[in-house]
Image (cartoon, rainbow, N blue to C red):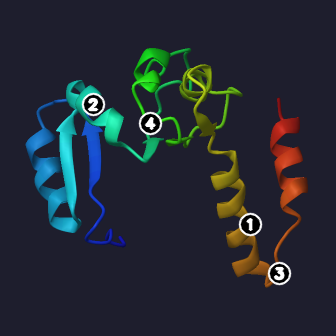
Amino acid sequence: MATAPKSVTLHVFNRMGEHFAEKAAKVQDLAQVELHDLDEIDVYLPYADLIVNATNVGMRDNRSVLSTEQFYDTQPDVQVVDIIYKPEPTPFVAAARAANRQADDGLAMLVGQGALSFEQWRGELPNVQAMKRAINKED
């Protein structure tokens, strides 16, 4: 795992559970990371430059980790990314866009990972646009 530059602090939010303290200790050993209970996220939202949803919330239901109201509390130029790419838009991306925030889903990441893997195996980059069309065609 690459570490963040000294001027960057990564804040990770997780639901408090029985393994929270153990996870916090492991994560804080890896990099300059602060692990918080998800209930504390509103305190940090106004200062975030990048918000990433790395959960599966919204993948199988119409829920978002953050509400549109919470996105209004962020900086207008905050970058928002959801690693989930379906449904399109994901509830997380829709909530961010409703607050007029720039938001992208995880399709580009999925296609990028696939393209790099293809290149490793075949020695050439695939047609990335064709890959995106193929994924969207599965609907």
Task: Say which quadrant the N terminus sits in.
Answer: bottom left
Q: Nearer the viewer, mark 4 or mark 1?
A: 4
- Tell me the element at label 2: helix
Residue farthest bottom in this picture: 123
Mark 2 or 1, closer to the camera: 2
Quadrant showing the C terminus:
top right
Q: Are marks 4 and 2 in contact (CB under 8 Å)?
A: no
Task: Give how far apart the Cα atoms at labels 3 and 4 are.
Answer: 40 Å
> In front here: 61 or 74?
74
Where disc 1 sits, the SS reads helix
Decide which of tag 3 and tag 2 comes sooner along the chain. 2
Q: Amino acid at mark 4?
A: Gln
- Is label 4 or label 2 in front? 4
Asked if residue 52 is positioned above or below residue 5 in the image, the reply reads above
Splitting the image into 4 quarters, where does residue 96 fall? top right
How far across and down, in percent of the image, does residue 107 sit? 69, 46
Say which amino acid is labelled 2. Ile
Residue located beneath label 3 in the image? 124
Please indicate whether residue 19 sits to the left or right of residue 129 in the image: left
Could you tell me residue 3's position as x and y percent?
Answer: 31, 71
Are the residues tagged 2 and 1 within 8 Å (C-beta)? no
Q: From the image, tell me which residue sits under label 4.
A: 75
**Label whose residue precedes the other's in the sequence (3 or 4):** 4
Query: Of label 4 and label 2, which has the lower sequence position?
Result: 2
Q: Are marks 4 and 1 in contact (CB under 8 Å)?
A: no
Mark-to-mark CA distance, 2 and 1: 34 Å
Residue behind mark 1:
115
